[in-house]
Amino acid sequence: MTMSVSRIAQAVAVKDLRIELRSRIVTNQVLPFSGLVMVMFAFALDSDDVLQGVAGGLVWLATIFSLFILVQRSFAIEVSDGALDSLRVAGVNPQGIFLGKSISLFVQLIALEVVLLLTAVVLYRVSLGGAGLVLLVTCVVSATAGLAFVGTLYGGLTAGARGRETLLPLLLLPVVAPVLISATRATEAAFTSNGVTVSEGWPWVAVLAVFAAVFGLGGLLSFGSLIEE
Amino acid sequence: MMQPTRVIDFVDAVAVYNDYPALAGVTFSVDRQEIVLLQGPNGAGKTTLLRACAGLIPVVRGSAHVLGVDIAIDRESIRERVGLLGHQNGLFAELTIAENVDFWSTVVGATRAERDAAMQRMSIDGKLANRRVSELSAGQKRRCALACLVVRRAEIWLLDEPHAGLDAKGRDEIDLILKEAASAGATIVVASHEVERAQQLASRTVSLVAGHVRGVS
Amino acid sequence: MTTTELPAIKGVGTQATRLYGVLALVALGWVFVGGLFFTPEDVVQGDAVRIMYVHVPTAWTAYLAFIVTGVASACWLLGKKHSMGFDRVAGASAEVGVAFMALTLISGSLWGRITWGTFWVWDPRLTTTAFLFVTYLGYLAVRGLGGSPQQRARRSSVVALLAVLEIPLVHFSVVLWRSLHQEASVLSPDGDIKMDGIMLFTLLFGVFGFSVLFAWLVSHRQRIMAMHDAQRASALEVAMVDRLQEASS
């Protein structure tokens, strides 16, 4: 009997998040790491004006650095005891695996970004109004969906390969460049940094949504052949 | 659906692993409900043969049929009906036994009753079920992995060194489980170094040497 | 052990590749002589304009190479037989493309240093080109991941098609980003070149020459890959014989 994609996705996502809650890699390691990155930026740039101007970019840069760790962790769960092999032998629909792993990555990234954005508000003293908040939430959701999709896609490709720790950033960095650019501009608009108005941020959210749609679809179509031997 | 009695049928099958002909022309067949022992030295191709039967590694030459399907052409359609337990258990260490079995039940669409029956067959009681895999002994992990295999209702069980790392009691348990599974309708292929033990279990022994079948007894 | 099973290919040249080779040599010879000596210097750019005769053709060829990689990957993926020839062409073309793109970036930044006074500007075209370069470095790394030839072909063709999706997104977001800034206008000297006949002729000859050079390199490279695959296959045959002897001893 073949199970529906959504049931498989749900089971995979719940399983990943439960493992995460128990191993606490994100809360105990990734969050402190990205928080530290934010503090280090403040040391390096050492000026309130500059920090307010670049706050959006720093949040997204810290998110993308953490993405590499999260993706590696997400697939280490699957390959450490051969579970991915078992899933393939069992003929479990790879689209369900792709969606499930994307959802769990999405949830973890959102948690991370909320903390990073709060850090930016506190440490870099950026301001956020009501219209800005709406823009920011939309931007975070669409950017994170895109990051979760490409992260899962390239994570599956490099899962189990030799030298994956170094290969993953090489593959992912150029792909996520549009997300970094667009999310940074939209976040700047939400913070009204550098004299940008909130409404100028919306076209960037459109880019983020297109990105998420393209790689979500691309991932659904290709994930199966990427994890196959 | 017609149930062929010959469920695995390899003729001169060649499978390549890391540019090396791990199977260099294997002729090998298994009938329904048989328990067959694969034995042979390390590097003889036992693991590759099991992985090829599961459709994980392509057969590049010769013919290979599993459950009547030519796996040189179609490696996917047999997968739901074949279960492989390799050197690794395929379990999630941070989850409990119950959660692992639940996960597998959900992704393959097993019912609650099937899940409970699987746990019972592996004599996993309520207390054991709620322990995390990382805390278990090797034998308990194996039983959990077998429970995951059972919920998948696999018709063919391919087991790679199922006795490895287990104590005498654990090995006896595995043997009992395999006998029960065979009488319940499963076909079982076991690769094992424990030749004497496995010979008692198996109806036939197939010896692999250097990627070829050298003897059947 | 016998060596007779190795394929009897002596070289990777054919009548056709020798023709390409001669054509490329003649065309590039003209670009060298014409570009350095016969063409005049530009009113605005001076001698720096001569870099263009290499820069523009290598850029064109690099883009052509990546289009070939994309098309060959699609052919491999969609073709019923999954012919390995397409995979080899995709890989060979990407290798040559990466080399030409490196030449493009180097010659472009040298030209920029002379003309604009800076090695690099965040112009959309430049930025996209740099991303394209890194993306295809990643593609080549994926080809080097190991596994069977089929696995390599499957993975790398999917990555090549994902790159085709990615590049317009990168380009579009960079264009949108740069449109907020006005610095891109430094590019305008590029459009101000008054091309006289011999300059245009040399440039077009350069494009032609580099395209033929590309074809020459790719056909050789993919034949070398084919020989490598054949060698792997024959090593497999030797190993098969060894295993048979071992099994029957």
Image (cartoon, coloured by chain):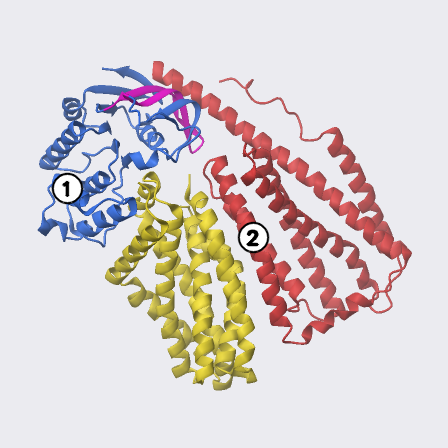
In the image, the chain rendered in red is C
What percent of the width, then of the height, locates residue B93? Answer: 23, 51
Figure quadrant of the C terminus of chain A:
top left
Residue A145: name its quadrant: bottom left
The kind of residue tagged 1 is Ala
Q: Magenta span: helix, strand or loop, mainly? A: strand
Q: Which chain contains the residue that carries disc 2?
A: C
From the viewer's perspective, tell me whether residue C200 is left or right of residue C54.
right
Q: Would you place residue C130 above or below residue B49 in this image?
A: below
Question: Which residue, given by chain and number where applicable, does mark 2 sit on?
Answer: C163
Magenta stretch containing residue B8, yes or no? yes
Q: Residue at x 28, y 35 (%)?
A: B84
The kind of residue tagged 2 is Ala
Instruction: State which region is magenta.
Output: B5-32
Could you tell me which secondary element the residue under label 1 belongs to?
helix
Question: Which residue, given by chain and number where applicable, does mark 1 sit on?
Answer: B117
Q: Residue at x 76, y 37 (%)?
A: C21
Q: For chain B, what colour was chosen?
A: blue
Camera-side mark, 2 or 1: 1
Magenta stretch containing residue B96, yes or no? no
Q: Residue at x 42, y 46 (%)?
A: A162
In the depicted view, which residue is nearer to us: A93 or A23?
Answer: A93
What percent of the width, then of the height, locates residue C110? Answer: 71, 62
Q: Which chain contains the residue that carries disc 1?
A: B
In the image, the chain rendered in yellow is A
